[in-house]
Image (cartoon, rainbow, N blue to C red):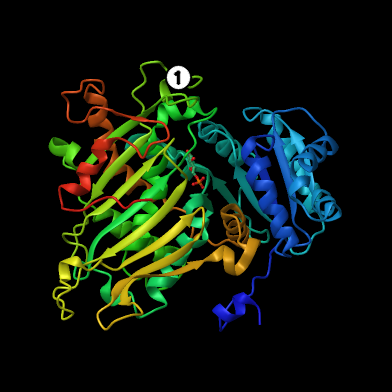
Amino acid sequence: MSLSDSYWQGNFCVEISPVPNTIIIFGASGDLTFRKLMPALFNLFRRNLFHENSRVVGCARTVMKTEEYRNRLREKMVENVEDPAELDRFLSKVCYMHGGYQDQATYSNLEHLLEKLEKGQDPVPNRTFYLATPASLYGEIVPLLGRYGITEERNADGWRHVVLEKPFGHDVKSARALDMLLHETLSERQIYRIDHYLGKETVQNIMMLRFANVLFEPTWSNKYIDNVQITVAEDIGIGARAGYYEKAGLLRDMFQNHMLEMLALVAMEMPSSFDANSVRDEKLKLINSIRPFPIKHLSKYMIRGQYTADGDMKGYCEEDGVKPDSTTETFVAAKVMIDNWRWHGVPFYLRSGKRLKRKVSEIAIQFKKVPYSIFQPIAAKDMQPDVLVLTVQPDEGMSLGIQAKKPGPKLCMGNLTLDFKYNSIFGGQSHDAYERLLLDAMLGDQTLFIRSDVIAASWRLLTPVLEAWDSFDAHNLDCPCHLRKYKAGSWGPADAAAIPKSDGFKWRNL
Ligand code: BG6
């Protein structure tokens, strides 16, 4: 019996039958395609989840022939591949065409190429477009795809889906404008807005944990939960992304999507079924139940920070492409309150930052202390509260800290951690988030993709904060909402502690 068999009994794995797809990647010579998308597609190919009639068409501005494109991919991917011949079999399904995204000829060439590739195939492959380009180009690419009929769904043909990377706007207004523009060409059913956190194994596990067990749900409310903490800490800085990051900042880059999506999964009600719209209906309801941040007392609910140099680590304002007096935030800590019966009075503390001490993302559910101890002289106040920690990365898993009898005399009690790590059970078998999401896009399953009304709700919540921050002088230390500086390699601004402290709580040690 293998280690994984001794942990897992019963195996209800719904078999997946791959369906034929032509995957058209715009931005095919970019970093995302080389680092994430192609390796993910190759892994699906290795696992027999890439239909034999599926093909990949890379499209980008760089002039090169298919052979050169395949060589570049091979060079980049081969070192992580066990069987180079298998990689070559995958690459034989990849072709490349160059063209400007604003250039009409690109789209007529693309349509001809697709017709040639799909000719005589039965069934006709679906088309999955992946826009791995800057979001500023969506407004050029999508209407032109529409004008040339490339995304039009005709009865006998397969579907036409378009996968988009964030950012989906930068505030309520721009998100609405982007949405209207997309909907001129595509129906919501055709739009797959990606949030790669939703493809992470532990994040997906939240729903199984909550809704496939009876153990947690009865305690999942203000009756038994004291507070919830969601942390996404990164040790890296902004690298070469100043152009994007200067306009975004952490609230837009991490909160509007990853943080709020995780919060919604932890706090939402049980969907009526596990289909895309039922799940997304519940997320929407939850995000709409978040109490608006009180702008007058904003600093009690949310603080922003920016890293400064330490040792050989540059400060944010010294990074290439960043203005020396930039007020872009690289850290945010927030307290979120949810106005519904289940969560009334339970603070959700969220924090995320760049250039922190180490990379770690986790969701910690801290239960209340027992109201009274029969184990005198051990008092209730001296017992640790139970805590359930879902580690999203780097060591994916979950642990449950409980009080238990320690071996020894009658009254020996301690905090016991029941610990599960995906890696120690399944080794390197875990699937990359992009692999999972690309597979779902190719199968036409929107559950893990974000619906437009959910995006709009998250912008409605965060736009007033962004506007308030813009209106305050970030460098004025007398202003409660000023930009707090923190040293690169630390755990963020010291003032972040005040957010849970005002409720009598502390951030968890990471
Ligand atoms: C992206 C953000 O969405 O997520 C990046 O734009 C961030 O700034 C990244 O670094 C974090 O993803 P992960 O999977 O490394 O935690």
Left or right: 194 in relation to 144: left
Up/down of 441 relative to 374, above or below: above
The residue depicted at 35 percent of the width and 16 percent of the height is 325
Is there any visible trace of residue 340 in the rendered image?
yes
Residue reaching furthest to the front: 409
Q: Where is residue 48 in the image (x, y as percent from the top left)?
A: 74, 65
Up/down of 382 relative to 183, above or below: below
Q: Is mark 1 on a helix, strand or loop?
A: helix
Number of labels in the image equals 1
Residue where numbered disc 1 is placed: 318
Near-viewer residue (71 or 354): 354
Q: What residue type is labelled 1?
A: Glu
Q: Position of residue 218 (x, y in %)?
A: 27, 77
Q: Position of residue 166 (x, y in %)?
A: 48, 41
Is there any visible trace of residue 453 in the rendered image?
no
Left or right: 167 in relation to 437: left
Near-viewer residue (120 or 336): 336
Q: Quadrant of the N terminus?
A: bottom right
Neighbour class for label 1 at 10 Å: few (<14), some, many (≥20)?
A: some
Up/down of 460 relative to 383, above or below: above
Left or right: 452 in relation to 411: right
